[in-house]
Image: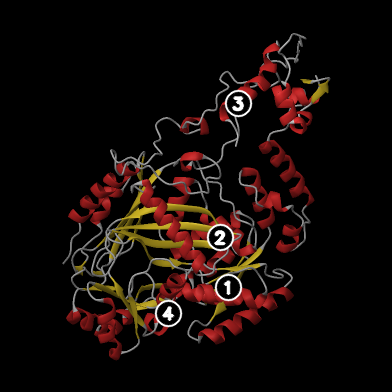
Amino acid sequence: MVDRKSKSAADADCFSCFRWLSSKPLGTYARADRSPDTSPQSWGLPPDIDEVPSKERPRVGSWASPVPSFAAPWGTWQMPEPKLQVLPQALDIQLSISETPGHYVSKAVATAQPHRLQEIGWRQAGARYSPQPGFMLEQILASPGRLPPHESRSDRAVADVEKALADLPKYASTNERIAKCPRRLLTERGLAGQQLRRGILKGSTIAFITTGYEGKRFIYEKACELGVRSVLVDSADSWSRQLVDEGIAVKFLAIDMSQSSDRLLDFLIEAIRNLEKDPKIGKVDAVATFAELSVPLTARLAEALGVPGPAPESTDQARDKFLTRQALARNGLPTPPVYEILSEQDIDPAIRTVGFPAVLKPVSGAASVGVKKVENEAELWSAYSARHHELGSMVISSGAIIKDDGQQGAAVGASAVIGARFVLESYLDGEEVDVDVVMSDGEWQYAAVSDNGPTLEPYFNETWAVSPSLLPREKQLALRELAVSSVKALGFQDGIFHVELKYTSQHGAQLIEVNARMGGGPVYSTNLKTWGVDLVEETLFCAAGIPSRPVATRKPVECIANADVNALRSGRLVDLSFMKPLLQREGVVSHNCHVREGEEVVGPQDGLPTWLVEVVVSRPTPREALDFLMKLEAEIQALVKLA
């Protein structure tokens, strides 16, 4: 057993040898305070940001980090560069050694630790050990000593990226360009790394499978801006056909959306392979989609063409809500009671398994179509019996589910795509959030939490959202953890995911669903304006097999709130005067009217409510943004006129 008192005395005796050192200031680098600073401000956090969970100030915006925080405490958003105080001039180290008694290591310590003393430069002279001037003593006292100053990591990265970009082969495939770059540069988190990833993406030929509604035009404009050669695949009457004439895309490939999925897949495999024979197009480097219903098709197409993409079984599980619940259960993740309903014979066992209140939803639905809350057996039977009526009023156009207004041409009925399989699952109460996740190399690289307002029940129509989240930080962390774990449980390694969850009163964080693509509506602009992360760019990186390392800001740039204003009553819209509060209003980022004058709109008492207008606002804090949005919505609703 070691005598602690003796050991302390021996250690004191050992280090007493430093008392004879007299020197000028040591080394090239120095700090005024030699004690380590572990306060939040030492990592670059401004004093007005409170990252510590606070029970005294609930919902003040103590948000969770949207990027992995590495070794930084407090969940800071990005590792800062070490800040060293550089003295105006280098100072030489001068050591003065005096040969007075007591300034050497005692015999007891030398006997106990001879090898350790020798390793740090102590030499034995007779019965005692004493330090020798030179490299080892210099490194003990003033590391790095006289070693020349090093180049900063960011400067090295910039120089290495410039060289890598200069060395990229000009007329090579994306895969060949990736192979030419060192892995450490491809995964560099920072502006230099992002510049390299953009350089590799530039010139890639990417086929986009169904282009979505016209509001997604910004996606293809961004791809063009990044130097991507876009091949657009959609029905012959798609709005996106004009993008070729405008120089935004290089090719439009018309497809017959009325044919079965397997025949459509076979057609696309052959058509995209044949593009290699076209000297203006060449071999396709990647395939991608921003349309929910086209995700499984795109995954199979990537597999058949041998280009990067998610495993088809993963996309199938994400699209199938029953398979999603099974995957979570297999991986030990929380999931509510659920029962698959294939026919009326499954209603009674579903009630016994799930109970009430419950939610009835299509297994492979989207956009809340066919989803309804039921409080009892009678409501369940009524909702199940009416399911075909609601689906019959919707159509699939360019991969999106929209209301049938008779102007979609050859659009396919939603009931033909979504099918007759339903699930009944326990109703989840509590606060709803979205988590936008970027996965690369099997790990999350970005995961931003935003709040959702209470959905308009019983149809779960979306109302508002705000970013960053106003929930307490510990709830955000639990929701983010479940979102990432759910994506992993489905088997995904790379990609962009829009994950919907709730933090319930009794069971904590619970998953609603995983969407294996970028979220729609204002999701793109919200992430870009709040955290500086471009989800279109990251989607293209993942599609092309380029590692994704989003460069997020360390604190929110702007605080964004948005609303899809629902019709609260049914009737014919007299005019669009409700748009007046939005015109040239300070703080209104954008607005997009969804209806036309004279159009019939539906309120929640008669079915899935009609969205009147999408509004996006910005304010200095998330609380202010949400309050401003609620004020605007009240003004809009007061001006809605129905006949």
Comes first in the chain, label 4 or label 1: 1
Residues under numbered marks 3 and 4 in contact, where contact means CB atoms less than 8 Å apart: no
Q: Which mark is residue 539?
A: 2
Upstream in sequence: badge 3 or badge 4: 3
Q: Amino acid at mark 2?
A: Thr
Residue under numbered circle 1: 311
**Mark positioned earlier in the residue sequence (3 or 2):** 3
| Residue 593: x %, y % from top left | 33, 59
Q: Residue at x 49, y 76 (%)?
A: 316
Check disc 2 and report its element: helix, strand or loop: helix
Q: Is residue 458 above or below residue 146?
A: below
Disc 1 to disc 2, how far (Cα)?
Answer: 16 Å
Give 293 or 611, whichever is nearer the viewer.
293
Rendered location of residue 376, percent (x, y): 18, 77
Q: Which residue is mark 3?
A: 6
Sort mark 1 into few (<14), some (14-19) or many (20+) by Cα contacts within 10 Å: some
Q: Which residue is denoted by mark 4 in the rendering?
A: 411
